[in-house]
Each structure stands twice: as C-alpha cells, then as structure tokens.
Image (tube, rainbow, N blue to C red):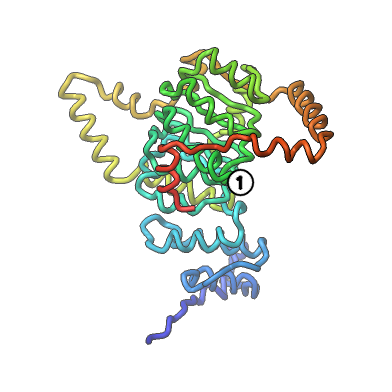
Amino acid sequence: MQEKRCKANVEDVITLDPTSTKETFVLSSLRTICIRFIAINIEHVDSLVGFPELVGKALFLEVEKGSHLDLHNPQCGVIMQLFLDAYHAAVLEHLTLRSAHLLINQHFDLWQRFTHLRILDLGGCRLGDGHDMLSFVGQLECLTCLSFQDNCLSDAGARKLTCPLRVLAHGPSNLRILDLSANPLLTNDAVRYLLHFEMLEILDLSGTKVSKRGIKKLEDKSLLMVDETAMRDVEKTFCGVCVGWAADTITRWTDKLQCSPSEDSNSNNKSTVAKFYGRSKQRMALAQTLTICKPSNRYPVICLRKSKHKCDVRLGQSHNTRSLSGEQHRSDAPHRKQHELSKEDMALMASYMI
C-alpha cells in the first residue's frame, strides 16, 4: 500500500514583506505554518473534534482560499462535514437560498449536511410538496426561523413538514418565526398541522387561502393574534444574507451557478426565441432579473404574532393545573385518547431516515 504524501510549499514558510521596497523576507509564525500545512492536506484529516474554535475558524478560512470547497471537488461535502461535526452552527448559522432552486436540486446531498441551522430562507424556490427538502427541514431541531415563501406548498406540504414533530416529537419544536406567504394552495386544513409549532411567535400566511375561520382557529388554539406589524420582523429576519464561517463559500457557490455556461446558453436560447416572436431584448432581460415581491404588495396581509395577554392567561391556567393531586392525574390517564396515525403519516415516516 502506498503511503499518502503530504504537500508543503516554501511560500508557506517565507513570505515577501509588502511594506518594504527591498527584497526582504519575513518568516511566518509556527502557528501560521501549521495551519497552512493542514489546510493544504485537509483531505487527510480524520477529525477536528476537540480543537479550539479559534483554531477551527482560522483553518476553515485557510481551506476556503484553495479549491477544496469548490462544488466540482468530489471531496467538498466530506471536508465541509469535517468542520460541521466539530463546530456545528459556527460554520453556518443562517442559510439563505432564495430563488436558488437549481443549486438546491443539483447539490441537495450537500445541504443535508447542515443540520445545525437556526435560520433558513428558502423563499421563491418553488420546491413543491414532493421535494425532499421538506423532509430534511422537518427534522432540524435547532431551527428557530424558517421561510417557505412562494414554494407552491399545499396542505400536503404542511403535513409533510410537521410529520416528524407530530409523530415522533422530533423536529423544529423551538420554531419561532414561520413564513408561508405566497403559497395560494394552503387552506384552512393546514392550520391543524401548524398548531404543532407551539413556540411560534410570528406566522405569516399572506397570499394563502386561509380564511377568517382558519385564523380564528389559530387564535383560539394558540397564543397567536392577528398583527400586521409582524411582517416587518419577518423582513428583518430573512434579510438575504448568510451568517457563519461558510457565508462567503455559499455566496461563491450561488454566483458561480448563476454564471455557469449552461445558464448562459439557456439565456441565449430564450433571447433568440423571444426575438422570433417579436419580443424585445429589454423585456426578456427584465423578466430574468425580476425578483419576488413581498405578498404585501399583492395580497391582503395575514400575519399573526404571539400575544402577551394570552401568555399571562395560559401561565395562570398552568399554575392552577399543578395544584391537582397525583391521584386525579392517574384517574384521568386511562380516559385519554391515543393519537392515531393516518395512512399519509405512516407513509411519510417510512420515507424518513431518522
């Protein structure tokens, strides 16, 4: 068996001093030399667990300078997982993939590695109910803010998203902000699934078919109340940027995919067809650069916010419940109804790999 040979360069030890006009060289520190050496040979590292976060960040930034984290590198996902196993949300806490459906579909196995996300923005991706991203997001336990705005979701998508939490109590139980606006296929039937997000503080249902009856059900069975000013907080939360060590890497991936040759050829074909049918180039360019508008510009605003008054009432009720004796609890236990799984839930759980 051939031994794996590690690479090292003279430039990693000696660097040219840019502040001097003479040809003087400055020796790099031992820490810098070690980090550069490990970054060059990162594919030979088995684990980074136990290394300080300060060292991990410096190593990640050094790896990022090379080609190890390029999408065309087959070891890209393995190297990213190396950092995710050791530093979790520090690598990527806020992921924005707005209107990046091509990037999601082509590299979905890569996104499945980011299991410690706290904020996820998938607005405008038009994934639909059958996409595997719903199953993945439904199992993110650290998630606190989620946007599925304009994703062609229906009641079946809401059921799929909440299935792990409803059935196995495994999923984003601490979700506080949920944006489901601009999904016109969502109806009042989706409300019973959304009620399982008990920690919700803001829910945006603008541009859906949820009627006043569905809103009243949300208000009666949760701590939410209609508050149109909550949309401002939604816009601030999903500001369109990534947060974490890998933020620049994600931006580079998105930019490269948008400027790929296949995209350019497709755009050229579209412009040729447009000219044939008498449309102007300016109109086609405008259609390609058109961004998704917030539902407030097209639909009535349906935003709900957690009510402080309801929280105080619920707190008083829970305090009174604790005063019940243990015998009363035991006597009530046999009469409680067990939750029965539907055929759809059973099929969904069979497809999950938890």
Q: Nearer the viewer, residue 147 or 163?
A: 163
Q: Amino acid at mark 1?
A: Cys
Locate the N terminus by quadrant: bottom left
Query: Is disc 1 surrounded by few (<14), some (14 to 19) or many (20+) residues within 10 Å?
Result: some
**Residue 284 image offset from top left, x and y in percent:** 29, 25
Residue 267 versus residue 36 in the image, above or below:
above
Indicate the quadrant where residue 59 lies. Answer: bottom right
Residue appearing at x 79%, y 32% in the figure: 321
Residue appearing at x 76%, y 21% in the figure: 309
Q: Is residue 47 visible?
A: yes
Q: Nearer the viewer, residue 311 or 28?
A: 311
Indicate the quadrant where residue 25 lies. Answer: bottom right
**Residue 278 image offset from top left, x and y in percent:** 18, 19
Q: Nearer the viewer, residue 282 or 237?
A: 237
Q: Which residue is mark 1?
A: 142
Residue 254 versus residue 202 in the image, above or below:
below
Q: Is residue 272 left or right of residue 241?
A: left
Q: Is residue 143 left or right of residue 8?
A: right
Residue 181 versus residue 159 in the image, above or below:
above
Q: Is residue 243 visible?
A: no
